[in-house]
Amino acid sequence: MCKLDAKGKPLPEKYLNADYIQNHLKKFDEGAAFIFTLEDIANPLYKIFNPKKFVLLKSDMEKIITKYKATKNTDFLEDALGYKRGSLKNKEIFVYEIESPVVKIPSGNEGGVNELWIPGGKTSGSYNEAVLNDVIITHNNSIENLSNYTPFD
Amino acid sequence: MFLLGEKGYKCIGRNDMGEPNDYLFCWESEIIPYIKENPKKFKDIFFNALHELFFYKKDKILGIYSVANHVFWCSYFINKASINLDIDLTEIINELSIIVDLNKDALRKDKRWAGAEWNSNNGLLEPIRRLLSRIVT
């Protein structure tokens, strides 16, 4: 499964049973969260986040934040979230929380999926992930336009 | 190829916008370190590469889009004082503006990347014009 072409991964419904998907998505009733940096909202080409943005289970994000605060090691953070090493180094990081998120299980065909992506709704660091199902969050290139965020540190 | 993200040169850090290249990660992981090592060489190499991108035959719109992104991030990191670079972006921005006007119909029809319907009512034309209006030199 992991060796399939990144451009044509099958829909999760083709290889995951309905109960697994339902149980996975049900977990997100507690809320979801994603991280962002000031650079992520700086480019005027975009005024909103990707409506199919990857999100983590809120409680998983809390575990990651707790562990990160103890070490201040961005390698841990990048591994946990499935990002390339170095992509969060020396950055001011913020957490955006979403109550009652509308989510789907990721297919791997979403924008920006890297080679660390694995099927089944877990990051390569084994935390629960999903993608927003066409949820519009507008930032207009300024953090002042966002409400549900907190600084990571 | 590196600036475009083609032929094995695609940078993927953590951008989840479905971009042809993770332009930000390119700057942070490759270009800024290169500038710090080669501050005098960079200007000519950069402008020559951007002028080639303006006339990228395989995908003209990708070329224009990549120029817009690289000019923006160059401006951003200069203004953030992440790089110390004696470079004036005014001329390349003016050229980009002219090329955008010349290609406005094709840009309007192009729904890729920032031109997706969830981000724009006018394909790539609206976001690139927004970028041009906000870029700080």
Image (cartoon, helix red, strand yellow):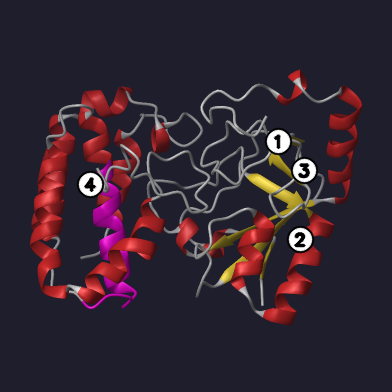
Which secondary structure, mark 4?
A: helix
Element under label 1?
A: loop
Q: Residues within 10 Å of mark 3 (few under 14, many from 20)?
A: many
Q: Position of residue B41 (x, y in %)?
A: 11, 68
| Nearer-N-terminus badge (3/2) | 2
Q: Secondary structure at mark 2?
A: helix
Residue that mark 1 sits on: A119
Task: Kindly indicate whether the residue at mark 4 contacts the one at mark 2 (C-beta within 8 angstroms).
Answer: no
Q: Which residues are magenta?
A: B66-84
**Who's the residue at 56% across and 59% down the image?**
A145
Q: Are marks 3 and 2 on the same chain?
A: yes
Labelled disc at residue A67: none
Instruction: Report how far apart the C-alphas of labels 2 and 4 lie in the structure.
Output: 36 Å
Dot placed on the residue nearer the N-terminal end, 3 or 1: 3
Q: Distance of mark 3 from mark 2, alpha carbons?
A: 15 Å
Q: Say what amino acid the circle numbered 2 marks.
A: Met
Q: Amino acid at mark 3?
A: Pro
Which residue is denoted by mark 4 in the rendering?
B67
Residue B83 vertical position relative to residue B100 in the rendered view, above or below? below
Chain ID at mark 3: A
Which one is earlier in the sequence, the residue at label 1 or at label 2?
2
Question: How dense is the environment of label 4, judged by Cα within 10 Å: few (below 14), some, or many (20 and up)?
Answer: many
Q: Main secondary structure of the magenta part?
A: helix
Tags 1 and 4 in contact by the CB under 8 Å rule? no
Chain containing mark 2: A
Mark 4 → mark 3, Cα distance in angstroms: 36 Å
Residue B29 within the segment the image draws in magenta: no
User: Residue flagged by tag 1: what amino acid is it?
Assistant: Pro
Q: Which residue is mark 2?
A: A61
Q: Which residue is mark 3?
A: A101
Image coords of residue B118 (percent x, y): 51, 33
